[in-house]
Image (spheres, helix red, strand yellow):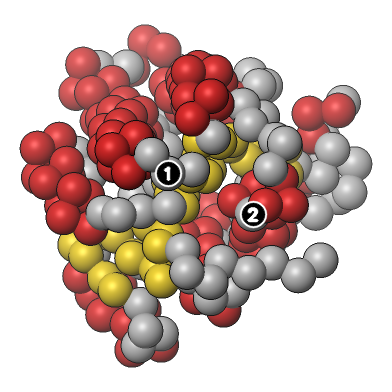
Amino acid sequence: MEISFSGKRALVTGAGSGIGKGIARKLVECGASVIALDVSQTSLDTLKSELPAIETVTVNLCDWRSTKDVVRSICPVDLLVMVNNAGVGITGPLEEVTEEKFDKIFNVNVKAVVNVTQTVIEDLLRRNSPGSIVNISSQASKAALSNHSLYCATKSAIDGFTRVIALDYGKKNIRINCVNPTVVMTDLGRQIWSDPAVKLPMLDKIPLKRFAEIDDVVDAVLFLLSDHAKMITGSCLPVDGGFLAC
């Protein structure tokens, strides 16, 4: 299946590393003009050295006003991928939840997604232009993971937000979907899941008996962004090796 984004402008948040970097790279290969947004200037400098054609922008997504101003300056945007590489994975029992922890994880994992999506959709409506948006959610939105109450709650919020926006803006030919990966073998993922005591119980719940690689997620995102998925909106696509089927 050949995918081309020639003539399209794509914004990828969290593009400095991991899944976001993989998506940004593939979008460039598919002909898109890509704007890579990340909180880390160092990561963006590395990305720019590897992909000179890419445009890079540094911003802290937790800052509502600065983020909105930056995204407005980037527009027009036809394709948006919200990747929370800087997302917060606060874990622990409910009795250890504090207001600070709650605000931190919801600000990054939910508030930033709402803000950027709102700004891009305003641009699409102003131009009366179709668009495609993909959020990176998680299998944690659909399955209870022990000691992940806040994280599961943020990802459930992303799934619900995706469905409502798909309903509200489908008539404007703006599609919004999300992908829900299992554990992904980014550099951080390999580090966290290298301990067999942590790794093996999770693998035991995955019928394919492996974790996702970055390209597994990238391929799903590019499909949903593309015209090959032009009848798909409001979907939450598991990329989980069958975890949610069990």
Indicate the position of residue 114 as horizontal and vertical percent values: 33, 29
Say few, some or many: other residues with alpha carbon within 10 Å of mark 1 (under 14 / 14 to 19 / 20 or more).
some
Q: Is residue 202 visible?
A: no
The residue lying at 82 percent from left, 45 percent from top is 241
Q: Quadrant of the C terminus?
A: top right
Q: Residue at x 32, y 17 (%)?
A: 97
In this rendering, the answer to whether 47 lies above or below 233 is below
Q: Which residue is mark 1?
A: 129
Q: Earlier in the sequence, mark 1 or mark 2?
A: 1
Q: How many labels sit on residues?
A: 2
Q: In this view, which residue lies farthest toward the top?
A: 95
Residue drawn at x 65%, y 47% as measured from the top left = 224
Nearest the viewer among 23 and 93 is 23
Give yes or no for contact between labels 1 and 2 (Cβ–Cβ under 8 Å): no
Residue assigned mark 2:
226
In the rendered view, does 214 fall on the left or right side of 134?
Answer: right
Residue 159's x, y, as percent?
55, 24
- Front position among marks 1 and 2: 1
Q: Disc 1 on helix, strand or loop?
A: loop
* Kind of residue sitting beneath label 2: Ser
Secondary structure found at label 2: loop
Quarter residue 144 falls in:
top right
Residue 239 can be seen, yes or no: yes
Q: From the viewer's perspective, tell me whether residue 99 is left or right of residue 182.
A: left
Which quadrant: the N terminus? bottom right
Q: Residue at x 55, y 26 (%)?
A: 170
Callout 1 amino acid: Ser
Residue 89 in the image, given as x and y percentages of width and height: 42, 37
Q: Pointer 2: residues within 10 angstroms few (<14), some, or many (20+)?
A: some
Residue 116 percent location from the top left of the image = 29, 39
Camera-nearest residue between 207 and 218: 218
- Distance (Cα) linking label 1 and label 2: 15 Å
